[in-house]
Amino acid sequence: WFSLKPGSLYYYRDAQDPHPAGVIDLGEFSIEKLLEEKTGKAFSFALLSDQRKFLLHAESNTEREEWIATIKQMQEQSGADVKYDGAAWSNPDKEGFLVKLMETRKTWKPRWCVLQGKTLYYFHNPEDTLDTSTVPTGVIHLDKYS
């Protein structure tokens, strides 16, 4: 069971579950239509990032097209709010190394994290924050989580 909200796709174990099993930050993913030959399922599509891949399938081609169009629209809307000009992490509330679990390999990697308001930016190392044109390795909008 999935619920689409601005910038995020929440997934649940079932439709009655009040708490999501997880959330996908759509700003970090690209979307790709998949062929049945590749997945073994009709009407499939994938959400792809450097670290994760979500394979999904709809009940019909029309439903798949609607999901893809709506997800792209949500990405565009949320993307307009995101500005990586360096100002966001130039005067942080907190910064330092945290260790992040890499989903694909189940290994832990250190990341330089910068907390500014309700947004956590992470980088490979502290030097990345010195160049204000740097795009963060990842961004977590904490107000989307409970």
Image (cartoon, rainbow, N blue to C red):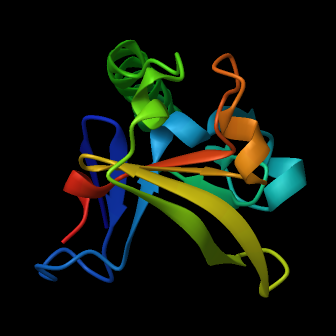
Instruction: Say if 93 sits above or below 63 in the image.
Output: below
Q: Quadrant of residue 78?
A: top left
Q: Is residue 46 left or right of residue 18?
A: right
Q: Residue at x 88, y 52 (%)?
A: 38
Q: Position of residue 30 (x, y in %)?
A: 66, 33
Q: Is 129 displayed left or right of 61 in the figure?
A: right
- Across and down, in percent, residue 2 comes to 32, 59
Residue at (64%, 38%) from the top-left corner? 136
The image shows residue 45 at horizontal and vertical percentages of 64, 44
Q: Quadrant of residue 52?
A: bottom right
Q: How many marks?
A: 0
Q: Is residue 26 above or below residue 69?
A: below
Q: Residue at x 58, y 41 (%)?
A: 28
- State which quadrant residue 3 falls in: bottom left
Give the residue displayed 60% in from the left and 47% down from the top: 138
Residue 61 or residue 69, whichever sits in front:
69
Q: Can the viewer see residue 60 in this picture?
A: no
Relative to residue 138, is residue 128 depicted above or below? above
The quarter in which the N terminus is drawn is bottom left
In which quadrant is the C terminus drawn?
Answer: bottom left
Closest to the observer: 47 or 119? 119
In front of the other: 84 or 67: 84
Q: Position of residue 35 (x, y in %)?
A: 80, 41
Can residue 97 be seen? yes
Side (left or right) of 64 relative to 4: right
